[in-house]
Image: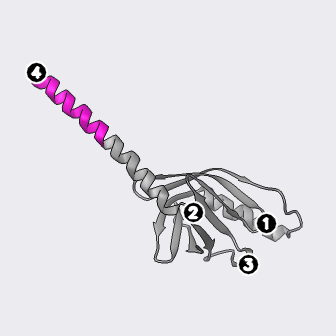
């Protein structure tokens, strides 16, 4: 009887913690929802932006627009997946195209997010920081 009681308590504890975990994720993504940011610590001339809508992101990479999906996890972990770019602007310089590729490569390796007083920092595992200022 005690074993059944302990088993039920364990199962209920697991179910409650899973439900709480799911709530934490949705609260975290809602913090970014509808917000647009401009990259301010590198590639200044390229006016790089990132915006968030639900679990998707999009922006201007300096040459083309880009978009994909992101996931937030407990502990300020953020993962960017399935980054795709348009191929609309072919008149930009080769330098601008290289900068856009470098930016997207860094974005793909982002592992965590920090919220600042005026924006966000996206940080890679090797501590490269993409510092964004909030636009809206």
Q: Residue at x 56, y 72 (%)?
A: 131
Please give the residue where the numbered disc 2 appears in the rendered image. Answer: 34
Q: CA distance from mark 4 to mark 3?
A: 70 Å
Q: Residue at x 63, y 72 (%)?
A: 39
Contact, mark 3 vs mark 2 (Cβ under 8 Å) = no
Contact, mark 4 vs mark 3 (Cβ under 8 Å) = no
Q: Residues within 10 Å of mark 4 (few under 14, many from 20)?
A: few
**Badge 4 or badge 3: first in the primary sequence:** 4
Query: Which segment did they paint magenta?
Result: 1-16
Q: CA distance from mark 1 to mark 4?
A: 67 Å
Name the mark on residue 45.
Answer: 3
Q: CA distance from mark 1 to mark 2?
A: 23 Å
Please give the residue where the numbered disc 1 appears in the rendered image. Answer: 63
**Badge 3 or badge 2: first in the primary sequence:** 2
**Badge 1 or badge 4: first in the primary sequence:** 4
**Badge 3 or badge 1: first in the primary sequence:** 3
Q: Quadrant of the N terminus?
A: top left
Q: Secondary structure at mark 3?
A: helix
Name the mark on residue 87.
Answer: none
Please give the residue where the numbered disc 4 appears in the rendered image. Answer: 1
| Residue 91, percent from left and from top | 89, 67
Q: Secondary structure at mark 2?
A: loop
Q: Residues within 10 Å of mark 3 (few under 14, many from 20)?
A: few
Q: Is residue 115 above or below residue 20?
A: below
Q: Is residue 42 above or below residue 108?
A: below
Residue 77 visible in the current orientation? no
Q: Quadrant of the C terminus?
A: bottom right
Q: CA distance from mark 2 to mark 4?
A: 52 Å
Residue 55 in magenta? no
**What kind of colouring is applied to the model shown?**
one colour
């Amino acid at each position: 009887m005690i074993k059944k009681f302990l088993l039920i308590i364990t199962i209920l504890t697991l179910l409650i913690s899973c439900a709480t975990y799911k709530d934490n994720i949705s609260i975290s993504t809602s913090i970014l929802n509808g917000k647009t940011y401009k990259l301010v610590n590198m590639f200044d001339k390229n006016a790089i932006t990132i915006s968030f809508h639900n679990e998707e992101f999009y922006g201007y990479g300096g040459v083309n627009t880009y978009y994909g999906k992101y996931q937030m996890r407990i502990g300020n972990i953020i993962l960017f997946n399935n980054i795709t770019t348009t191929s609309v602007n072919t008149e930009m310089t080769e330098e601008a195209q290289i900068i856009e590729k470098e930016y997207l490569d860094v974005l793909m390796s982002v592992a965590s997010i920090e919220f600042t007083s005026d924006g966000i920092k996206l940080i890679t595992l090797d501590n490269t920081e993409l510092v964004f200022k909030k636009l809206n």
